[in-house]
Amino acid sequence: MEGVAYACHEHRGMHMAIDSVHTEFLDDASRPVGPGENARIVLTDLDSRLMPLIRYELGDMGSYLDEPCACGRGLPLMQEIACRTRDVFEMRNGKRVVRAD
């Protein structure tokens, strides 16, 4: 899958290519999260007829913004990728910690 999101010259995030990829931000129970919440990124390819990927989990975590971009494109924004799911550890008390390299 190519072209999931593209950088914006306003540097507020990346514009999601909603015409070719459906992007979901899901919690551990596969429920949608709200804007600004880091979650698993799950994609569905809308272009490939030969071998479509449906609800493909990348292993990336990130969030989306629910506000218009000043550039005027009108496409939704996602923030930069926060981390990989394998870099997140859950403590006994439920707190999540992201591994730093």
Image: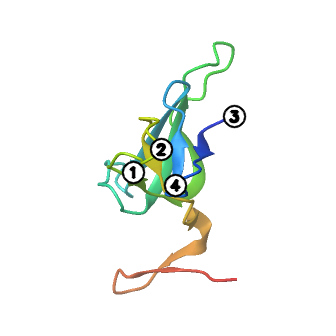
Give the labeled residue for mark 2: 71
Closer to us: 84 or 9: 9
Q: Which residue is painted at 58% across and 56% down in the image?
A: 60
Give the labeled residue for mark 1: 26
> Secondary structure beneath disc 3?
loop
In the picture shown, does residue 11 fall above or below 47?
A: below
Q: Which mark is residue 2?
A: 3
In front: mark 2 or mark 4?
2
Residue type indicated by callout 2:
Cys
Closer to us: 21 or 54: 21
Q: CA distance from mark 2 to mark 3?
A: 23 Å
Closer to us: 76 or 58: 76
Residue type indicated by callout 4:
Gly
The mark that comes first in sequence, 2 or 3, is 3
- Identify the residue at the far top of this view: 49
Give the labeled residue for mark 4: 13
Q: Which residue is painted at 60% across and 39% down in the image?
A: 4
